[in-house]
Amino acid sequence: MAERITGHTELISLLAYPIRHSSSPAMHNEAFAYLGLDYAYLAFEVDNDSLEDAIKGMRAMKFVGSNISMPNKTVVGQYLDKLSPASQMTGAVNTIINHDGVLEGTITDGVGFMEALKDNDIDVIGKKMTIVGAGGAATAIQIQAALDGVAEISIFNIKDKFYDVGVDTVRKINENTACKAQMFDLADTEALRREIADSVLLVNATGVGMKPLEGKTWLPDASYLRPDLIVTDTIYSPAETEFLRIAKQVGCKTMNGMGMMLFQGAAAFKLWTGKDMPIEHMKEVLGISYD
Ligand code: NAD
């Protein structure tokens, strides 16, 4: 008889829509099986309309916790009992931990990105980075980078609904950390060239480069890059975006979003199980190798 799932197995969910493409269920279930932990991780198609009921269900059925992804990250906080400082600062939640009925929200995307840099021997502490994006992932990265000691962060975004989020992030960073943050319109290509020129790291934290914008990039052309610039993308599918393809051609060291995915998951895994995710095994299974 199959023994993997028993009457004792504890459940962890992923609440998002769309979500069937996610690598998280395979990643967490592989780690549970590898370590012999009696948990199961399942994805549920939950959007803003069904989110409150789903959280009530989590409470009633005593789930150990959950991951939260789009479009629920900035909405779920109102249904929880408390928020970590990182979630309070970013206004977003990607992980829920059930402490005996008290649901706490936190966000591990920023930690995940910074850990992935470290794992790939990329050092930005005390240095300057330029990052394009002001949505959930971008904000988490910007706040964590500032808290970790990045000296300067220049943020670019198009003038959509996320632009003001970026302005607010700049204010929070400048008021609460030693990091100097600035906000720019992505249409200001002169500023983009100037800010990239004295940065050690350039990050894409927008959805440009993945479906439905696969094959596209906001980078005007390769002349904005130089070989000693480190270029990273938060996107992991496709593994090589147009942005990273151009950077590789210039000779830049590059990193895609797979490492961030692994380390944000590892941080949540530790919060739920108290155990370290087997990182080297997971890198092998997920096919993560850095350039
Ligand atoms: P979001 O919807 O909160 O933010 C989207 C961002 O993209 C905004 O800054 C928006 O202005 C920008 N944008 C959208 N269309 C644009 C265009 N045409 N030109 C320029 N900018 C545009 O989304 P999010 O959750 O922050 O996700 C952003 C990216 O981060 C996605 O590619 C997602 O896959 C990635 N992500 C990766 C991980 C990981 O673990 N690797 C985790 C979370 C998010």
Image (spheres, rainbow, N blue to C red):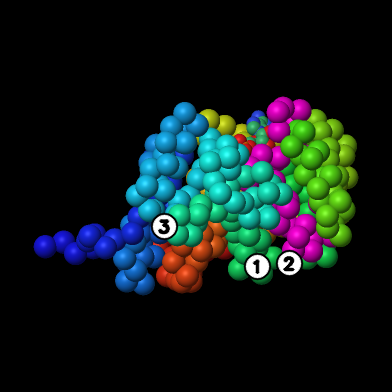
Residue underneath mark 2: 123
Q: Secondary structure at mark 1?
A: helix
Asked which quadrant contains residue 218, the reply is top right
Viewer can see residue 29:
yes
> Neighbour class for label 1 at 10 Å: few (<14), some, many (≥20)?
few
**Magenta residue span:** 133-162
Looking at the picture, how far across and down is residue 48, in whole percent?
A: 50, 31
Q: CA distance from mark 2 to mark 1?
A: 7 Å
Q: Nearer the viewer, mark 1 or mark 3?
A: 3
Q: Nearer the viewer, residue 97 or 217?
A: 97
As drawn, 16 above or below 117:
above
Residue underneath mark 1: 118
Q: Quadrant of the C terminus?
A: bottom right
Residue underneath mark 3: 64
Viewer can see residue 17:
no
* Mark closer to the chain start, 2 or 3: 3
Q: CA distance from mark 1 to mark 3?
A: 29 Å
* Mark closer to the chain start, 2 or 1: 1
